[in-house]
Amino acid sequence: MSVLAGELKWWQQEIVYQIYPRSFQDSDGDGVGDIRGIISRLDYLSKLGVGVLWLSPVYKSPQVDNGYDISDYCDIHEEYGTMADMDELIAQAAERGIRVIMDLVINHTSDQHPWFIESRDPASPKRDYYIWRDGREGGGNPNNWTSFFGEDCWFYDEKSGQYYLHLFAKGQPDLNYHNPAVLEEIKSIMRFWLDRGIAGFRCDVINIIFKDSLEDGRRRLILTGSEHYISRPGTHEILQKLRSEVLDNYDCFTVGETVFVTPKMGQDLCDPERRELDMIFSFEHMETDQFIVKWFKRRFHAGRFGKVIERWQQAVYWPAVYLENHDQPRSVSRFADDQLYWRESAKMLAVLLLTQRGTPFMFQGEEIGMTNFDFNSLEQLQDVESHNIDRLLRRFHVPAGIRWRMLKRTSRDNARTPVQWSREAGAGFTSGKPWLGINKNHNKINVAAQEQDEESVLNFYRCLIGLRKQREVLIAGDFKLIEAKRSRIVYERSLGHERMLIILSFSDKPQRISYRGDMIVSNYDRQTFDGKLSPYEAAILEIIM
C-alpha cells in the first residue's frame, strides 16, 4: 500500500523518539527524571537526528502506574517540574526543529482525579463520568470480565455502595463514553495542549475506550469480556469526532496504541478516508515469541517475525514502526544476542527499524543498544503489572523459580531502567539514588563511551537516520518481502527506478546467500558484498535497474 512521495506529510518524514520521563535524565538529584533533564539533552537528540519527541505521561498523578493514572490532565506532576518547564521544553525543542507530542490517556483516569472523587457521590453530576454498577444478585462482581493487569476489573466502593469498572489497576477507573459530557471534557484537554504548541498525541489503548455492553463475556484465559470493548463502532465514532472537531484545526498527528487488532481493524482505524487516527501501534509482531500471552515465551523465529511485519506493511496506509517501547523488553535481548554479538545485533536491529515503510519510533536507550536489566529479585521491580502477575501465578501454585524467570524476561521494567549516559555511579542519569536500578553494564554500554567510538551503535544510528533522510525510497518506497526464514529476513524497498535490498541475519552462524548489489551500509563496515553473511549482519544493497 504505497503513498506517493509528493503527498508525504511532515510526520511521515520524521523519526520519533520516545522519552519515558521518569528514567531519561534527572536534573535535581532526587533520582527521578524530569523535564529540565530532558531540556538539558535536547542537543544530543538534535544531533541524533530525531524530529519528534513523544513524552510518556508527565501529568499530575499519584503514580500507581507510573503516570498512566492521571489526576489532572492540565498540570504537571511535581516530580517532573512545572508548567513553565513544559512550556520551555516545547519552545527549546522547536528552536532545534523538534516537535513534541504527548500521551493522551483517556480510557481511564486516576481514582484521585476530581471527576472520580465527585463521582463517588451517587447524586453527583459526575456520577455518570465513570461506569458504576450494582453487584450481582446474591453478591459478586457485576459481570465476569477480567483486567489487563491480571486482577479483577471491578472494585466495590463502600462510600458509593456500587462497583466501578477498571480494565487496568484499581486506581485507574474507566471513563464512560456513553455520557457525551465526557467527550467534551476530552476535547477541552486536547485543545489545551495543542494551543500550548504540542504537535499531536500518542493515544493510549485507544481502541478499547467504548464499552458497548456490560454483559458477561465468553470465558477465556485472558481478558474475558473483551469482545464488548475492542474496536467497537462507538470507538470509531468518537475518533471521528475528535478528528473533525479538534485535530483538523491544528497541524498535528495522532498515533494510537491498539490492542488485539487484526490488520483489517488496524486499517479501519488509520485509513485516511475514515478520518480517525493517522497511525497505529499494532502488537502482532511483538507476539511472535509468545504463546497466548507475553508471559509464556517461545523461541524467537525470524521468519515468523518477518511475515507478520510484511502483513502489516501491506495492510495499513501508513505504519508506525517500532521494536521497543516502555511496555516491551529491550529488543537486543529479545530478538538477537545481547552478549557475544551485542554490537552487531544492536546495529542489525537499527537497520530493521529504519528501513521499513512508515514512521519509525525509537525508544530511549535503543540507540546505544541498552539491554534487559540484570534484576535478581522481585523486590527490584517497581512495575504494578509484574507484581499483579506474580500474585496471580502464586494463586495457581506456579513455583517461585518459574515465576521469577517469567517476570525477569518479560517485565516492563526491563525498558524502564534509567538511560545510561556515562560509566560513573548513577550512569550520568542522577547524582542521587535512582528510582529504579541501573544496569551494571552501564560501565560499558553508555552514551559517553559511544560518542568517542566511530564504530559505536550510537554513531551507526546517526548514520542510518541521515541515510533515511537522504533517500526517499526508504521513507515512501514500496515494501516487498523477499525471504523470511528462521535465521534471516530479506526485503526490498523500491520507488520509481530506485531499488534497495535489505538483508538481515538473525543467526550467530555465518550464512551464504545469492543476492548481490552495491553495498550502501553494513554493520560490519565493509565496502562490497560477496554473498557471505557474518553473524547478525545487516546489509543494505542498491540494485541497479
Image: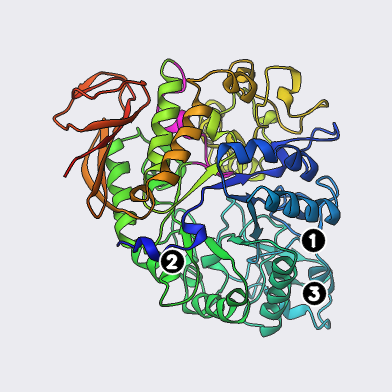
Dot 1 crowding, Cα within 10 Å, few <14, some 14–19, many 20+: many
Q: Which labelled disc corresponds to residue 119?
A: 3
Which residue is rendered at x = 75% and y = 64% of the image?
A: 196
Q: Residues at badges 2 and 3 in contact (C-beta under 8 Å)?
A: no
Residue at the image position 27 percent from the left and 37 percent from the top: 489
* Residue 4 in sight: yes
Per the picture, the main secondary structure of the magenta-coloured stretch is loop
Q: Mark 1 or mark 3, which is nearer to you?
A: 1
Residue 524: within the magenta?
A: no
Q: Nearer the viewer, residue 397 or 493?
A: 493
Residue 218: numbered disc = 2
Query: How far is disc 1 from disc 3 in space, using C-alphas?
Result: 14 Å
In-front residue for pair 461/378: 461
Is residue 33 positioned above or below 180 on the image? above
- Which is more toward the observer, 148 or 114? 114
Give the magenta-colored segment's residue range: 324-339
